[in-house]
Amino acid sequence: MRFLRQSLTGLFLLSLTLGLLVWAGAMVRDAVQTRLAEEPRVPQARERVFAVNVVPVVFGTETPILTAFGEVQSRRTLELRAAAGGTLIELDPAFFEGGRVQAGQLLARIDPAEAQAALDRAESDVLDAEAEVREADRAILLARDELIAAQEQVDLRDRAFQRQKDLESRGVGTAAAVETAELAASAARAQVLARRQALAQAEARIDQAQTRLKRAEIARNEAQRHLDDTEIRAAFDGTLSGVTVVGGRLVSANEQLAQLVDPQSLEVAFRVSTQQYTRLLDSDGTLREAPVGVTLDVFGTDLTAAGRLTREGAAVGAGQTGRLLFATLDSAPGFKPGDFVTVRIEEPALPFVARLPASAVNAAGEVLVIGTDDRLESVAVEVMRRQGDDILIRARDLADKEVVAERTPLLGAGIKVKPLRGPNAAAPEEPEMLELTEERRARLVAFVEGNKRMPAEAKSRILAQLSQAKVPARVVQRIEERMGG
């Protein structure tokens, strides 16, 4: 009986198993047939909408700023050179690099012994020449007196000759007496000629003495100049630069000792393109005295100065382009010659232009405008100026329109967009942060570490977020939804 009962039980279980298998196969067959009989469902295509930042187009008058780079230099720079060779016997205490000196201040002195001796000799020659002039003056006075006396002798001899002739005509005198008187008158006239010759020699002596005196004075002035050349003085108030000498050094003639720079008379030299140069000309073709701003970047603390355009270079140097311009700085505290600065020049104002971000215009000079039904339209504009990250454009029929601020390769004409307006439209919202208790944090960490299906990279990123003092609320919410709590 036991065997029969067990056999029947096994048969019953086998039949039940076969029946379940047949029922499961029928269900699978019916499901496959139903799926094959259904029509294929094509997902409905949806148009992709891009969110873009837009800015309004507002036309008005803008003053473009031309930016260039230049070098600060001093308008007054003097090379201090030794006019005479010799030993430096004296140096001013301020004669060093960066020393400030005053106009007329004695900076250095070269040994003046030889120059002083030459000056003394020249002054002695001047004294000799002056004495010669005085002697010549006295000699000509004597020569004139002798000439007057000789002329008086001629008059006396002529009267005596005439008296002897009268006596001879009356028969009282003799021919010998007349002849003697005539010879005496002739000798007196010869004496007058000799005195005239002596007077001419005295006058020539005066001219020679004066010429000698003039030469002596020239030699004395030259010796004085050589003596003055042994002293080196400051021509104006300034600062010494490039000092290369010390006291007691032997210097040669024309050797440069230092440079004297005027730190209060500064200008900046910079080069602009020819196109930029034409914008700075007035209607007469003359360079305008436009305002200039100069900035020296010193890592956060910028030095600024103001000035005006003053002149331009006379010619374009070999291998160079553009134009070299100079601007005089009104007041430039902290600036030094040689500083590399940024120069900003105000150009003439441009009317009827709009300022847009530079990223709004492509290389072809086109912008994307929000059109009907928030679809983009491509419009050509005229780029007038580029101002850093902005541009100044001029176009028709764009007043009060909205332009895409940042163009991307995904954007083009006809694409539907979602305009984001306002200065903070593109800024993402700050995620909500939560401060977790230790129990809650431990429960979340245990769930993440026990999740076997989560990738290792995502698991490490979430664990790093959970280890922070504040955790994003969205991360906590997703984990707790999966935990079921």
Image (tube, rainbow, N blue to C red):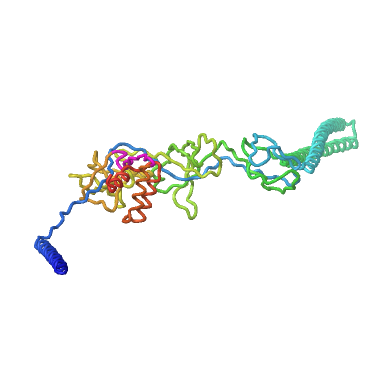
Q: Is residue 482 visible?
A: yes
User: Is 336 rendered above or below residue 407?
Assistant: above
Q: Quadrant of the C terminus?
A: top left
Q: Quadrant of the N terminus?
A: bottom left
Depth order, front residue of 326/406: 406
Relative to residue 52, is residue 16 drawn left or right?
left
Quadrant hosting residue 170: top right
Going 83% across and 37% down the picture, which residue do you hit? 195
Q: Position of residue 388 (x, y in %)?
A: 38, 44
Going 48% across and 49% down the picture, which residue do you hit? 315
Residue 426 is covered by the magenta coloring: yes
Q: Position of residue 72 (x, y in %)?
A: 53, 42
Q: Is residue 162 visible?
A: no
Going 40% across and 39% down the picture, which residue do you hit? 346
Residue 5 is covered by the magenta coloring: no
Identity of the residue furthest to the left in this view: 37
Depth order, front residue of 323/386: 386
The number of callouts visible is: 0
Quadrant hosting residue 93: top right
Q: Position of residue 159 (x, y in %)?
A: 84, 30
Main secondary structure type of the part rendered in magenta: loop
Relative to residue 252, is residue 431 drawn left or right?
left
Q: Position of residue 210 (x, y in %)?
A: 76, 38
Depth order, front residue of 415/310: 415
Relative to residue 116, is residue 55 drawn left or right?
left
Quadrant hosting residue 96: top right
- Give the residues drawn in magenta, as a range: 422-438
